[in-house]
Image (tube, rainbow, N blue to C red):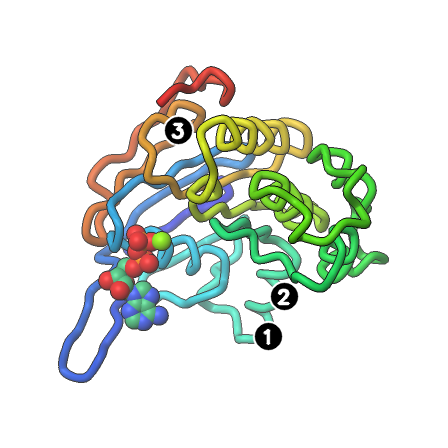
């Protein structure tokens, strides 16, 4: 098992108002699987993903990733965990505008330590011919491909994708989902993905439905659908 979340709780306090964002989450994902988190806006999806990725911390409960209790790590250890074991893909790509495609990947790759190299990951996402272009010269889908290359260059155990197709049109979304499925197969990367789109869950091994900080449904999908066959 790669991810084991037990009774995870998280609240935000603002003045006298306490917002219980995660109310005792239980979720598990095996190595090599694709998991999808579905749920309305404000249900706690990003908070849950950020805690699993070491961007944020839970208040109580346990978050075990590949055998390590990440809530027991100190700040420095948590930063190392995040950098070395997790790849992040966000809705708005977050590429550095004044760096080329290749340089955007280079800044995170820490070349001597990276098991994969820049040329390999750019080829894997179909963007090698754009290595010397700047983000503004690329379409949204191309920028997302580059951000996926950046996320996988350190060969992370876990790829966390927060609405990776949220800003893309239908055809481009399908091609990005297909790419994520290819990354999962080629490198064995476990993927946890947030989406608003229930149809996308067809490509996942496990589906978690979140409502107001609680998992209201956890389903195992025995027959996953290739991303290019999903329709919505
Ligand atoms: P989702 O990703 O499902 O839309 P989020 O996890 O982003 O939901 O947010 C869940 C709730 O937590 C919302 O009510 C949001 O306002 C609150 N929240 C998220 N991050 C913070 C923060 N850093 N400080 C205060 N409240 C936050
Ligand atoms: Mg969110």
Q: Are marks 1 and 2 in contact (CB under 8 Å)?
A: yes
Label 1: which residue? 76
Label 2: which residue? 80
Q: Is residue 231 above or below residue 173?
A: above
Label 3: which secondary element: helix
Q: Is residue 49 above or below residue 28?
A: below
Residue 56 location (% of width, % of height): 43, 66
Depth check: 113 or 69 in front?
A: 113
State how far apart marks 2 and 3 are (Cα): 31 Å
Q: Is residue 166 above or below residue 75?
A: above
Depth check: 219 or 41 in front?
A: 41
Label 3: which residue? 200
Residue pictured at 71% horizontal, 64% vertical: 98
State how far apart marks 3 and 1 are (Cα): 36 Å
Asked if the residue at label 1 sits under 8 Å from ligand 1, the reply is no
Query: Badge 1 local density, few (<14 within 10 Å), some, or many (20+)?
Result: few
Residue 89 location (% of width, % of height): 54, 49
Query: Badge 3 local density, few (<14 within 10 Å), some, or many (20+)?
Result: many
Q: Quadrant of residue 95?
A: bottom right
Q: Earlier in the sequence, mark 3 or mark 1?
A: 1
Res 9 visible:
no
Instruction: Answer left or right for 52 relative to 136.
Output: left
Residue pictured at 50% horizontal, 47% vertical: 160
Instruction: Find ligand 1 in the image and state its quadrant.
Output: bottom left
Q: Are marks 2 and 3 in contact (CB under 8 Å)?
A: no
Residue pictured at 59% horizontal, 61% vertical: 81
Q: Earlier in the sequence, mark 2 or mark 3?
A: 2
């Amino acid at each position: 098992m790669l991810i084991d979340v037990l009774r995870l709780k998280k609240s935000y306090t603002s003045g006298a108002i306490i917002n219980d964002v995660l109310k005792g989450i239980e979720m598990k994902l095996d190595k090599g699987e694709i998991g999808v988190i579905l749920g309305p806006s404000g249900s706690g999806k990003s908070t849950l993903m950020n805690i699993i990725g070491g961007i944020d911390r839970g208040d109580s409960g346990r978050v075990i990733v590949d055998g390590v209790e990440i809530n027991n790590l100190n700040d420095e250890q948590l930063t190392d965990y995040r950098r070395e074991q997790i790849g992040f893909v966000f809705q708005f790509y977050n590429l550095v505008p004044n760096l080329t495609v290749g340089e955007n990947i280079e800044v995170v790759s820490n070349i001597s330590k990276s098991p994969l190299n820049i040329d390999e990951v750019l080829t894997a996402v179909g963007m090698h011919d754009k290595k010397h272009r700047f983000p503004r010269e690329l379409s949204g889908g191309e920028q997302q491909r580059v951000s996926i290359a950046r996320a996988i260059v350190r060969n992370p155990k876990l790829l966390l994708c927060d609405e990776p197709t949220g800003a893309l049109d239908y055809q481009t979304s399908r091609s990005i989902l297909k790419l994520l499925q290819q990354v999962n197969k080629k490198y064995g990367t476990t993927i946890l993905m947030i989406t608003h789109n229930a149809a996308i869950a067809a490509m996942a091994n496990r589906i978690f439905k979140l409502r107001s900080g609680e998992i209201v449904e956890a389903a195992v999908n025995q027959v996953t659908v290739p991303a290019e066959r999903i329709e919505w």
